[in-house]
Amino acid sequence: MDNEVEAYLGRVERTFAFIDLSGFTRFTSIEGDERAVMLLALFRRCVRESAARRSVRIAKWLGDGAMLVGSEADRVALTALEVAEFVNRSSPLPLRGGIATGPVILFEGDDYIGDAVNLAARLADVAGPGEVVSDQRTSDVACGVVTCDPLGLVPVEGLATPVRVYRLHLGSGVAGVSGDAP
C-alpha cells in the first residue's frame, strides 16, 4: 500500500443526515420553476440557520435536499428535526430524513466514505413524508435530547440484514426551536 492510500485510511466518527423535500419533482411540474425556487430558498435558509446554530456542517446540497455532517449525533439530530418541524409546518411539501452514525474515511479533506454515509442515505429512503428516522447508534446518543420511537428491524435496500430503526421527533421544550422560523 502506498503512502497516499494509507493517508486515506484514517477513520473519524461522524453522524450524517440526509434530508429532502418529499414530492418536489411533482410539485415543480405542477407549480412551476419559480414556485419551486421560492420553496428551495426557504428550505435552504432554514437548513443554513439551524446547522450554524448547532455547529453542524452542510456537506452537500442535493437539489431539493442536503447532506449534513457533525461530530455529535444529538446536534445533527436536533438540526434535522428542527428543519423538519419548520418545513412540515411552513411548506406545502413535507420533509423526510435519515440519520446514521459511525466510523468513516475523511477523503481528501471534504468527502466521507463509509457505511454510516450510505446508511443515512438509505434511511432517508425508508422514512415516510414528514418523518426523520435513525439507526441504533444515533438513537443511543440523541434520545437523551429528542424522543425516539422504536420501529423495529427494518429491511434497508442494499443491506444484507435489517437495521434497527427509530423514528425521531422533538419533544416539548427543545432549545432552539422557535414558533415561526429557525
Image: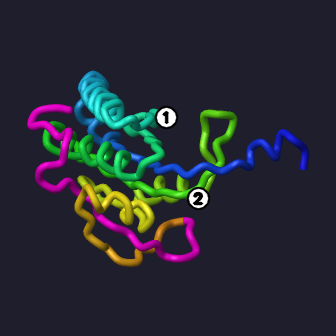
Q: Residue at x 35, y 77 (%)?
A: 152
Tell whether 23 sits left or right of 7.
Answer: left
- Residue 55 image position (x, y, % from top left): 39, 35
- Residue 58 image position (x, y, % from top left): 44, 34
Q: Which mark is residue 60?
A: 1
Q: Residue at x 28, y 47 (%)?
A: 95
Res. 35 visible in picture: yes
Look at the image and give the residue range highlighted in magenta.
Answer: 158-182
Residue sitting at the far top: 34
- Residue 27 image position (x, y, % from top left): 27, 38
For the residue pair 19 and 143, the one nearer the viewer reads as: 143
Q: Which mark is residue 165?
A: none
Which quadrant of the rendered structure holds the C terminus?
A: top left
Q: For mark 2, what is the residue?
A: 115
Q: Residue at x 26, y 55 (%)?
A: 145
Q: Residue 165 in magenta?
A: yes
Q: Is residue 165 above or below residue 80?
A: below
Residue 39 occupies quadrant? top left
Q: Residues within 10 Å of mark 1 (few under 14, many from 20)?
A: some
| Marked residue nearer the N-terminal end (2 or 1) | 1
Q: Is residue 50 above or below residue 161?
A: above
Tell whether 176 sits left or right of 23.
Answer: left
Q: Residue at x 58, y 74 (%)?
A: 160
Q: Residues within 10 Å of mark 2 (few under 14, many from 20)?
A: some
Q: Is residue 145 above or below residue 54?
A: below
Q: Amino acid at mark 1?
A: Lys
